[in-house]
Image: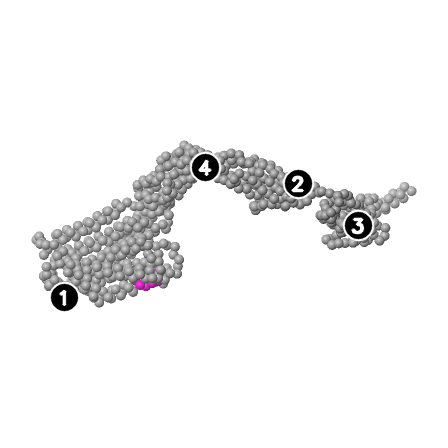
Amino acid sequence: MRRLLALLVLLVLPLAGAHAQGDPPGVKGLFLLTDYPSQTVRAGEVTTIRVKVNNAGLVPEPLALSLQGVPTGWKADILGGGQPVAAVMAGVNQDVTVQIRVEVPKDAKPGSQNLVLNAKGQTLQQASLPLTLTVGTETPAKLSLKSRLPSLRGTPRSAFEYTLTVGNDSGKDLTVALSAQGPANFQNTFTEGFGSNEISSIPIEAGQTKDIKLKVTPPRDVKAGDYPVLVKVAAEGATAEMRVTLQVSGQGKLALSTKDGRLSGEAEIGKASTYTLILNNDGTAPVEEVEMSGTVPANWKVEFNPKTIPSIAPNDKKEVQVAVTPADKAIAGDYVASFRANGRGEQASADFRITVTTSTLWGIVGVGVIAVALLVLLGAVMRFGRR
Amino acid sequence: MPRSREGSPFTGLGPVFLKEFADHLSSARMMVLMLFVIVFGAFPVATSLQTLRTVVDPNSFIFLRIFTLESEQVGISFTAALNFIIPLMAIGLGFDAVNSEFNRRTLSRVLSQPIYRDALLLGKFLGGLATLAVALVALWLIVLGAGLLLLGVPPRGVEVARGLSFLVVAIAYGGVWLAIAMLFSVIFRSTATSALCALGVWLFFFILWPLLAGALLVGLAPSEIRSMDDYAAVQSMGLGLMRLSPGTLFSEAVLGLLSPETRTLGPMLPSQMRGAIMGAPLPFDQSVLLIWPQVTGLIAGMIVVFAAAYVIFQREEVRA
């Protein structure tokens, strides 16, 4: 008897296994499912509710859909694949999704409305889903703004880049306008996380966050100090703001030029020619230990007086004499010499065009040769001249 | 024993000069020579002007390019053409300066006038040089005028100055060959012989001398060139040999004047090129300084050859 029972169990088990594959065992029937059976709608707006028609282990058949309890003035449609539908048919252990599009009139009174979605087959299959729609004020748009590094330090020439995280904490997608307000002449640009395009607004889906980058470029001549920049994001009446800070440290800036700006000169072969260079500090901090150097053609000599300058205050200038001696074997013509000034972390250079001239000594020698030839002629005239 | 002479050696220079000048200008020979020069000069100028009109030349010295441009059709520039036409012209004017007078037995008649031999020779030389100068100036003006008409831009001051200096160098170059031709006309009684000799010297310098200088250089140069300096020394020695030819002096002087970007006429060491701005034109005075040895060489050569002709002429028997 026991052996017979065991055999029966063996026979039945695969059947039971097959039955248990699609569904949790024991759950069988027609279901209407939605994530939020009770939600808030706003007067004058359209709300879409997603409903899944789930057939768990039943024979498929057409199911007529109907909505009950739609208040007067409201408009409710059942949509499937974007089209109004009146019936669905779900395969065994399969879902069909439909949307209920509810248009709430503008003058709808606050309060709860109960709707029931019915699905009814030709035989006994049927299911219903009660939905509660509360007309009321929706949660207002809400934004958040965060920065990991709200305070950056740099020189007037650095780019201050802040990574900001904008969050849309409201229940719907928003287009967020971005703005930043800094001191005068500070340039602010927003870019998307890793993009290079400058943006002024960014769409953010409900509940999502997005990284944006704010780049602040201070003017070159900005004094050392702390500068706040107020970043504001706004969408549909919601705003969020935060303050980021630029800590600008002073920096010297060297510029090399001449008194009248002329960067050319003449030099005679083998002779030192002196030019006066002007070294400016256009920066905001003094430049220390400025050393002068120069690159000249081969075998030329270049000397600076003074060779080093201990310090140049901001907006101050110093004169430097540079003596250039072209090589003895240099050929007349134009040459490039570059002069450089190197301070601590700062440098400036200027290319100087030097026109090398040859000495007129050989010209005089040439005249001498002609004079000698004339003397020979004169001598001949003296010696051989006759009547 | 030469006696101390009375009066200036230049007495009678004026009439001799004017007569010679007038004779040259009205002679059929001059016409033929001018025709020859214009035909030879016109071809390179016409083709270079055509090229300059069609090509956008970045060179700012566009007028000087008329003289130096070597067009593909002709293969010779105006200055290169002048380099061998000027000697031919000068020889044509000078090869019978003295000996034709002698052959026509007019020399003693002239000298019986209050005219010194000094003045006769110098007057003949200056007359020839003036004729040459007139021809060259005319040619120069024709080229400049054609350039103005066809290019439609006026030359700049620097270009005019360089062009005028080129004219002076060309006249000095003609003077050398005129002096050589007159030297032979003094030495040889036969005009044919003197013409042949002068043309022989011309051919020697134009055809034989470059070959001979090359051969001499091979003999003189060190067997092994070890450094850049050795190479430069050999190069400058070769140039020195070539510069014994007046044609080389002329072409170098023209190069320095009409191609302002020329920095040196000799070899240029790499160390000298470092830092140099290539293609930058030299100032006019620097260009003149660069070619000054060539110019003085031409002028001094002219004087020395003339002095030689003078000495030989003074010692000659002129009575026939």
Q: CA distance from mark 4 to mark 1?
A: 92 Å
Q: Chain of mark 1?
A: B
Residue at the spot 25% in from the left edge and 48% down from the top edge: A363
Query: Does B234 sit above or below residue B148?
Result: above
Quickly name the residue at label 2. Answer: A142
Drawn side of residue A285 relative to residue B79, left or right: right
Quickly name the residue at label 1. Answer: B104
For the stretch drawn in magenta, what is the main secondary structure? helix
What range of the chain is rendered magenta?
B41-48
Q: CA distance from mark 1 to mark 3?
A: 144 Å
Drawn side of residue A167 relative to residue B262, left or right: right
| Residue B98 place in picture, x, y as percent | 16, 61
Look at the image and say whether residue B46 sits in the magenta stretch: yes
Q: Amino acid at mark 3?
A: Leu
Same chain for the residues at labels 1 and 2, yes or no? no
Q: Is residue B110 visible?
A: yes
Q: Amino acid at mark 2?
A: Lys
